[in-house]
Image (cartoon, grey):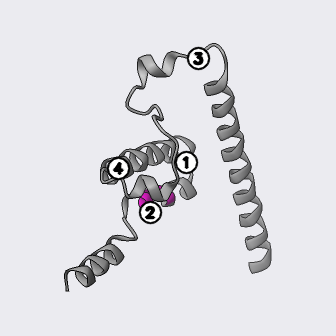
Amino acid sequence: ATCEQKATDFESRQQLRAEELEAITKAIEIISSSSVQGSAEKHLPSLAQQQSGSLAQLRSAGTSGARQERVAAFLQDRARQLNSRVLSALASRAVADPFAKVKKMIKDLIVR
């Protein structure tokens, strides 16, 4: 009975992942379509990407706290819309700064 339950749970999670990937693919298609090109500058100026860079560069930019909060809010909103526990967990991890303790330790070492 346990194996059967785990198998059905696995299948349902796989289906959820497939639906999430389909939603992301659809969103990418919509965003890159010619009918909405140019609308981002008009409606979403704060979310438009200004420069390319790695995640490490974005984290070290100094205003990463506000960015992290916006990303987490966006992910949490999508998690509610899609009823996705995975996106919800990702949103909660996006809020937390896993390197805060490491950065503090490095600063303390530099100060010494």
- Does the residue at mark 1 contact the one at mark 2 (Cβ under 8 Å)? no
Q: Residue at x 43, y 58 (%)?
A: 94
Q: Residue at label 2?
A: 93
Q: Is residue 1 visible?
A: no
The mark tally for this picture is 4
Residue identifier under label 1: 83
Q: Which of the two marks, 1 or 2, is nearer to us in this view?
A: 2
Label 1 and label 2: CA atoms lie apart by: 17 Å
Q: Is residue 111 above or below residue 38?
A: below
Q: Nearer the viewer, mark 3 or mark 1?
A: 3
The answer to whether 31 is drawn above or below residue 76 in the figure is above
Sequence-first tag of 3 and 1 = 3
Q: Which mark is residue 69?
A: 4
Instruction: Check whether the beta carbons of the residues at disc 3 and disc 4 lie within 8 A of each other.
Output: no
Q: Earlier in the sequence, mark 3 or mark 4?
A: 3
Q: What amino acid is found at the position of numbered circle 2 in the picture?
A: Arg
Residue 34 locus on image (x, y percent): 66, 15
Q: Is residue 76 visible?
A: yes
Tell me which label, 1 or 2, sits earlier in the chain: 1
Return the residue nearer the eye: 110 or 13.
110
Tell me the residue at 65%/40% (across/down). 24
Q: Amino acid at mark 3?
A: Val
Pair 2/3: label in front: 3
Residue of label 3? 36
Give residue 99's position: percent from left, percent from top.
38, 71
- The residues bearing labels 4 and 1 have C-alpha atoms spaced at a distance of 20 Å
Residue contact between numbered discs 4 and 1, judged by CB atoms under 8 Å: no
Q: Nearer the viewer, residue 35 or 8?
A: 35
